[in-house]
């Protein structure tokens, strides 16, 4: 199954209280409407993902209105990035 399909299936607008598997975390992605993704913790160490985290820090500081980590980029960019990360 392609990573794009896995990420799209991990969206759970109607199941926001669903448990997160061990070794994963929830991030909210989007410029206006935020979508929920469950990603592996290993992504946090990748320089490309750390760039996104820096952008999130600049925009939100330590206040994340969704209650989880909020990434201020388009959903398509995020899916492309995580697709790249899954192959490295």
Image (tube, rainbow, N blue to C red):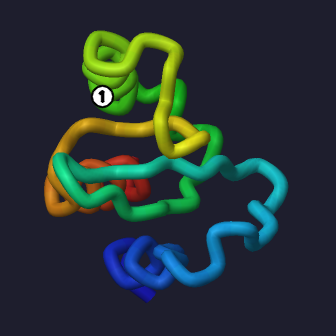
Furthest-front residue in view?
Answer: 65
Viewer-nearest residue: 77 or 14:
14
**As displayed, is residue 85 above or below residue 58?**
below
Residue at position x 46%, y 79% in the image: 6
Report which quarter residue 67 is drawn in.
top right
Viewer-nearest residue: 82 or 15:
15
Report which quarter residue 59 is drawn in.
top left
Q: Position of residue 75 (x, y in %)?
A: 22, 59
Report the number of discs.
Answer: 1
Q: Position of residue 25 (x, y in %)?
A: 65, 48
Residue at position x 49%, y 30% in the image: 64
Viewer-nearest residue: 46 or 32:
32
In the image, taking residue 16 as reference, residue 54 lies left or right, namely: left
Q: Residues within 10 Å of mark 1 (few under 14, many from 20)?
A: some
Q: Which secondary structure, mark 1?
A: helix
Res 60 seen here = yes
**As displayed, is residue 62 above or below residue 28?**
above
Residue at position x 50%, y 39% in the image: 43
- The residue that label 1 is drawn on is 52
In the image, taking residue 36 as reference, residue 78 lies left or right, namely: left
């Amino acid at each position: 199954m392609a990573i794009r399909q896995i990420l799209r299936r991990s969206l759970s607008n109607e199941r926001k209280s669903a448990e997160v598997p061990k070794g994963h975390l929830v991030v909210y992605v989007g410029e206006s409407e935020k979508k929920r993704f469950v990603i592996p913790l290993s992504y946090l160490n990748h320089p490309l993902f750390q760039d996104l985290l820096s952008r999130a820090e600049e925009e939100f500081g330590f206040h994340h209105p969704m209650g989880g980590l909020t990434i201020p980029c388009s959903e398509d960019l995020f899916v492309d990035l995580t697709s790249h990360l899954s192959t490295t």
